[in-house]
Image (spheres, rainbow, N blue to C red):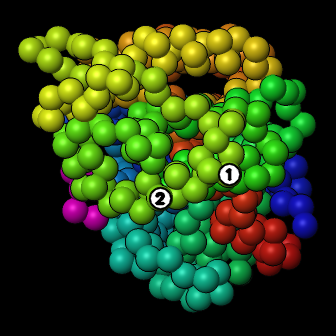
């Protein structure tokens, strides 16, 4: 069943709730990076151009976290980015929120308060039950239609993502539409097709590797970061106490067994590091597998030059690359080389898809953003889409209330 898009939605003078993902790094009470706000600029501008009255829904941070804050600075920045008035109200589904929406003129928007300030939004429900939550039932009377542009959160089944389609005609925004078009059509991209799975999302990355290898979507899977370390451990390499303690602290003991099973089934198409970088006496030191574990307090923080040679040679012959996760702790200057060099090699591949916020942040840090094709706005959602394509928020749109 297809998902409706903005092309199917009549918006003039209608009250439209728009769920976006503008969850951003904060600094000194303001936004440290507005990349996610800019990503939604096309959707919001198009709706306002067409005379909609927009109620913008979003979250910021997680309960208890340092970034769990109000959306006031996000509203201020959107007011600067868009050529239309954007206000803010410190309410989400109360009478104050409904009054703010009712008071909008055509071509005006209001940012409602952080949806996660309410406990319901930090829980997951089946769509029907989500449609009965206070957040959804409180806002539905103030809205005529709903647009979900929050692909980065689409793998979650939370009220603001799956509840409104139970009551309102609902559509995908331009970010969501573009993500579904690209990620839903991986099999049509040219081969050889190489997946680069790095970073620390080990369970998700192993899920992706299983899926793309079992379904013959990948010719080669390159692993790096914590993902690569788990595959090394699965192959029997002694990484030393520091690296293994980190893997255990993350609860990834069972993932070593899963990675071992994957190597048994598809080891001919999986590559893992041939050397790793550690810090020794304040300097970077590359250590080959035959010299591990090295000193027990030395954690593997990056891939080494021998690994890069192998990975470059594979990427040199690739026609498509799907890149998700850094090769190491790229934020530390000692350990940025692996990620920079791996991404530089990936940037030369004809077709490229980039997934995840850390991946995009590293690409921006190294000034490579103009060399890649599609930048996915979601890490977890991108991985989930690449695994089985079943995203709760997208399924809710497919079965939305009719207009």
| Residue 64 part of the magenta segment | yes
Residue 114 position, x and y percent, is 39, 61
| Side of 111 relative to 332 (left or right) | right
Query: Which portion, as a residue range, is magenta?
Result: 63-68
Give the residue number, with chain letter if any, for mark 2. Answer: 257
Q: Find out whether the residues at labels 2 and 1 contact each other: C-beta distance under 8 Å.
A: no
At a point 41% along the width and 34% down the height, the residue shown is 225
Q: Quadrant of residue 286?
A: top left
Q: Residue furthest front?
A: 290
Q: Quadrant of residue 285?
A: top left
Q: Residue furthest left?
A: 281
Q: Nearer the viewer, residue 147 or 299?
A: 299
- The kind of secondary structure the magenta stretch mainly shows is loop
Residue 88 position, x and y percent, is 41, 53
CA separation in Å, label 2 and label 1: 13 Å
Q: Is residue 354 above or below residue 132?
A: above
At a point 62% along the width and 77% down the height, the residue shown is 163
Give the residue number, with chain letter if any, for mark 1. Answer: 265
- Tell me the quadrant of the picture where the C terminus can be found: bottom right
Q: Is residue 82 above or below residue 74?
A: above
| Side of 102 relative to 366 (left or right) | right
- Describe the element under mark 2 as helix, strand or loop: helix
Residue 349 position, x and y percent, is 72, 15
Q: Quadrant of residue 84?
A: top right
- Describe the element under mark 1 as helix, strand or loop: helix
At a point 50% along the width and 77% down the height, the residue shown is 124
């Amino acid at each position: 069943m297809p998902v409706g898009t903005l092309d199917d939605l009549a918006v003039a003078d209608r009250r439209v709730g728009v769920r976006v993902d503008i969850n951003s790094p904060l600094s000194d009470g303001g936004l440290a990076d507005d990349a996610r706000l800019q990503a939604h600029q096309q959707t919001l501008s198009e709706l306002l151009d067409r005379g909609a009255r927009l109620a913008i829904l979003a979250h910021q941070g997680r309960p208890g976290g340092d970034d769990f804050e109000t959306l006031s600075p996000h509203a201020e920045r959107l007011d600067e980015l868009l050529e239309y008035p954007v206000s803010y109200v410190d309410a989400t589904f109360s009478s104050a929120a409904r009054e703010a929406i009712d008071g909008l003129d055509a071509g005006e928007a209001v940012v409602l308060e952080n949806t996660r300030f309410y406990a319901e939004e930090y829980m997951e429900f089946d769509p029907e039950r989500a449609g009965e939550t206070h957040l959804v039932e409180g806002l539905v009377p103030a809205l005529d239609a709903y647009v979900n542009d929050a692909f980065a959160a689409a793998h979650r089944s939370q009220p603001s993502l799956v509840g409104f389609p139970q009551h309102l005609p609902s559509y995908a925004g331009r970010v969501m539409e573009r993500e579904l078009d690209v990620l839903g059509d991986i099999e049509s991209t040219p081969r050889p097709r190489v997946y680069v799975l790095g970073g620390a999302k080990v369970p998700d990355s192993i899920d992706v590797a299983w899926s793309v290898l079992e379904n013959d979507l990948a010719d080669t899977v390159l692993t790096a970061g914590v993902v690569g370390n788990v595959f090394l451990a699965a192959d029997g390499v002694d990484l030393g106490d520091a690296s293994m303690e980190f893997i255990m602290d993350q609860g990834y003991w069972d993932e070593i067994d899963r990675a071992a099973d994957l190597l048994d089934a598809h080891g001919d198409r999986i590559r893992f590091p041939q050397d790793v970088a550690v810090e020794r006496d304040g300097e970077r030191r590359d250590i080959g597998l035959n010299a591990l574990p090295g000193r027990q307090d030395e954690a593997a923080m990056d891939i080494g030059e021998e690994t890069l040679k192998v990975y470059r040679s594979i990427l040199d012959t690739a026609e498509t690359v799907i890149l998700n996760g850094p090769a190491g702790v790229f934020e530390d200057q000692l350990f940025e080389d692996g990620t920079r060099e791996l991404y530089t090699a990936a940037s030369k591949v004809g077709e490229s898809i980039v997934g995840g916020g850390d991946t995009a942040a590293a690409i921006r840090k190294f000034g490579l953003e103009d060399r890649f094709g599609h930048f996915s706005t979601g890490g977890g959602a991108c991985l989930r889409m690449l695994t089985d394509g079943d995203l709760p928020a997208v399924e809710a749109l497919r079965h939305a209330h009719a207009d």
